[in-house]
Every structure is written in C-alpha cells, then in structure tokens.
Image: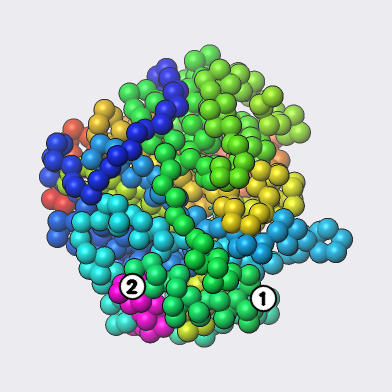
Amino acid sequence: MIKKYLLILSVFIVTACAQNNTTSIQSQHAVAMPDSFSADAAMAVLEEGGNAVDAAIAAQFVLAVTLPEAGNVGGGGFMTIAFNNENIFLDYREMAPANAHRDMYLDSQGNVKPYESLFGAKASGIPGTVAGMWAAHQKYGSLPWARLLAPAVSLAEEGFIVPNKLAANIANYVKKIEEQKLHSNFVDYFAHAKAGKLFVQPELAQTLKAIQTQGSDGFYKGKVADKIVRFMQQNGGLISHEDLQAYHAVWRDPLAFTWNDYTLITAPPPSSGGVAVAQWIGMLDAYSDKHTPVQHNSTQYIHVMSEIGKRVFADRAEYMGDPDFIDVPVAALTEPSYIKKRAHEIQESTISPTPNIVPGLPESEDTTHFSIMDKWGNAVANTTTINLTFGSGVVVTGAGFLLNDEMDDFSAKPGVPNFFGAVGGEANAIEPYKRMLSSMTPTLVKKGDDVVLVTGSPGGTTIISSVAQSLLNALLFDMSAEEAVNAPRFHHQLLPKDTIRMHPGFADASVSELQDMGYTIDDRRFGDVHLIKRTEEGVDAASEKSGRGKSIVRPN
Ligand code: GLY
C-alpha cells in the first residue's frame, strides 16, 4: 500500500568533522561492492577501525585496478555521505577543459561527428576522482591516506587473478576495436588479461604510488600530470597542465526530501538523478492517491512508472545542467503541486502521445557503485564512472590508466541524443570548466537520525530507474536486500518513443499486455545495484547477482 507523501525540499546544515559518531552505536557494519577485491579491501578498513569514508577511499582506488570497465582514477563521480548525523554530497564530476567549446563535436555542416565525444583523448573531461578522494580524506579520513592506497598499489604491482566476467568484457572490447579499426592502445595494456591468470599493471602501480606518497598533487602535478598532457598533445586531446591544476572537487548540499516516514538524501545537480527520483516517487504517490494502488511489477505498475519516466526525462532534457553555470529550478521541479499536476495527467491504460510530453514548468553503459555502512552508523553511497565501458578506450601512455569519455554526457547539439539516447538543451551545452550533466544517483535513506538504506547503480540514464525501483522494493514493498536488488526492473525515458527497457523475469502475460497497449519492449538488462538495508533486526546487504559483486555484513 502506498502511503501519502509529503515532499519537502530542505538543505541540511553541514558542520561535519572527522570524529566518528558515538551517539548511535551499532555493532554491525557492511559493504555492498561491485567486485570481491573492493569488498575485501573496504571490509578490512572497517575491521581495522576505519570509518565508512576511509573504506570508500580504499575501495575507489582498488576498483581503478580490478574493475577497469568503470573503476578509475581517470574519471569522476559523486559520493553521498551521512556522518555524525550530518549529510553531505561530494561532487568530483569531471569538468570540460578550458579549450572546450559548445560546437567542438560538430562538423562543418553542423552535424555531430560520431565517436569524437565517445572515443579517444578528445572525449575526456578533466578527471576528478583523485581530487575527490583527497577532499573526502581531508574532511573525514581517520586512517592514514597511504594505508588506504595500499591495497590498490599491491593489486596493481603484484597483480590479481582475472575474474571471468572481466576477461570476457576485455575480449569483447578488443574485438570491437579491431572490427571498427579504432585507434587505441587498449590492446597493449589489457589484451593479455586472461580469465584465471595473474594480471599485473606496473605503470598503474607507479601512478598509484605517486598518489599514495604525494596526495592529489601526485596526480594533478608532477610526472603523472606530464604524462597526461603529453598524451593529450600527441592524440588530439585538450587537457592542459592549467586544466589539471584548475580541477577542484566541490562539497554540495545534498538534495533531501521526505517521503512517508523517511528522509531521502540524494544527488543534487550536476546530477539529474536526485530530482528525477524525487519526481518519480512523488508522482507514483500522487497517482496512487487517485487510483487503486498498483501491485509490484504488475502491468499497471510498469505502465504508470513508464508514464512518469516520460515526464521526468522531458524535464531533465530542458532544465538540468551544472548549477555553477545555470540556474536549475530544483525547487520548482520537486514542488508537490507540480508533481501532483503531472501525475494527474497520467491515464490508467492509455499511453500519452510522446510529442505531447514537453517540459512541464512555465546517458554498453557502465559506471559502478558501492554502498558502505560503518559500525557507528555512518554511511557512504558512491557512484563513479569513466562513462562507457572502458571509458574513452585509451590509456595514458606510461601512467597505465584509462581516460573517461564523459564529454558525451554534454549535449553536443541540442535535441541530438547522446549515447544513452538522452537529449539535452542549452542548459547542458559544453562550456569551459563546466561539469556535464549526470544521472549518477548515490542515495541514502534515513529514518530519524539512522541511515536505513544505502543504494545506487551504474547504467547511464537507467541509473535513475534502478535507484528509484530498488528503493521502492526495499522500503515500500518491504523486500530484503537480496530481493530488492534482484527483482526485475524496467526503464522508460521518453525517447525512443513508447519503448520500455525490461530485465528478463517479468511475467509473459505482463509483457504481452504492455505490447497490446502499444509499447515496444527492449529486453536488454541494465544496472548493477549494491544495497544495504538496516532494520530493527539488523543490517542486510546485497549485490545484484548478474554482476560480479560481493556484499559482506560483520558480525553476521
Ligand atoms: N556517465 C554516466 C552518468 O554520469 O550519468
């Protein structure tokens, strides 16, 4: 049963410090991670007395070694943190280089050049990950920085046994590079990584050691910076020494709204995700006020949620971008009367014509996510990305890490879809030092002062559906962590017209009914949710079965 909601946007006052919370002691701590290496490293930090942020920093660097499809030092991300009863958001999203300009991916006819924003050095924004982790450590770290880098350094230097899924992803990518005759050094760095065999990355180990000993200066200045800039100059990229030194992570107020008995703490712009989740959950509630409540994953639920998705993505395309460059009307987009008005347009069994869904006021997808809760109840939801699987597909020569292709998350030309089929407008046009719009939505849910849910997912624009549905699964439909991450999900984003992307596992009857209503079904899976749920019975954590994730709860 869907309860009445009250949507109140509020800004939390943040005065966090690095001491652990001693007021709400809990003994259990948990990690839900995209692979076993990051899970073991993060849990070791927690067991050693480190806090959730310490564990997140260790995990982030491990993923740069063991999950090169999305883990990174050459990308960026967002971290939502609840620490000592305070809530804060760390934006370490990439920025466009100073020489970037709005038409940089257009040909002389004004058409978008395929691939330029997706592949190669020119596709890369200024990486933010190292600055982000450094900022997180300065503010909240309790174990030494060098200790937190140690697992990543050792996995790069001494190697790790390549999991089957990583080997398969590398083999597919090598095949794509060869078939499409793409200019890349990816093969030199990754083609010898074979399932079940030791994979050593000596250049990456040197880069990580520079970061370990010099902090963020080890990446943005000195030898690593020289290698990045030389690589850019030799391969048509734009990032300069000045750009690397201009990069800064930003502490922002998270987006916070109440829903039933909970407070959701989630991603503000330059993520579109928090606003989108607020709209999605709010419109479902508002619709349910006027109609018979919809059952989980029924035809009706999928239709209503899809209708909501169309409205969410129409607003996303028009209004969302970097808040340091444009005014994003967050309050208006999440205002209860606006949400109600949009929800009440939805018809019970008729698809609304796509051209009628306009903005309502007067982004293979990769990325990776992890969730952590420490024994004091502090929590981190962290989503990090180099955009597509293996990012821009090119490795900084001598430094051993893949660069992002995040520039594709800008709108290269208003109205022309990016890789994820998302269209954008002026709000997300390219400008020097601007952050590109994201869908990453690392989310925490609190009941009173206690974090009761930590969730997030990769998947470009589908992230928003994965987060909203995993949250509804766990808290509205009262599923365990395991059930909440593995229940089949679906996604609708306005365009392509009347198309619902659906995981396998839905009832055949529902799929046929949706097709009879006029929907086209796209059966490609998406997302990889890692979720921690805390109830009075204890802490429960799960990683989606389709991935190579691992979750651990201690003591269990
Ligand atoms: N690159 C995917 C996102 O940031 O949404």
Pointer 1 residue: 236
Foreground of the two, 287 or 323: 323
Pointer 2 residue: 214
Image vertical order of residue 62 relative to residue 110, above or below: below
Query: Closer to us: mark 2 or mark 1?
Result: 2
So how many labels did they put on this image? 2
Image vertical order of residue 83 relative to residue 405, above or below: above
Q: Secondary structure at mark 2?
A: helix
State whether residue 187 appears in this view: yes
Q: Position of residue 444 (x, y in %)?
A: 35, 40
Foreground of the two, 325 or 128: 325
Find the magenta span and give its range: 196-214
Q: Is mark 1 within 8 Å of ligand 1?
A: no
Q: Residue furthest right?
A: 109
Foreground of the two, 538 or 97: 97
Q: Residue furthest top?
A: 290
Q: Is residue 375 left or right of residue 367?
A: left
Mark 2 is on which residue type?
Answer: Gln
State whether residue 469 appears in this view: no
Residue at x 44%, y 55% (from the top left corner): 249
Residue at x 66%, y 54% (from the top left corner): 431
Foreground of the two, 36 or 293: 36
Q: Position of residue 513 (x, y in %)?
A: 61, 33
Q: Secondary structure at mark 1?
A: loop
Quarter holding the N terminus is: top left
Q: Position of residue 210 (x, y in %)?
A: 36, 76
Secondary structure character of the magenta stretch overall: helix
Residue 517 part of the magenta segment: no
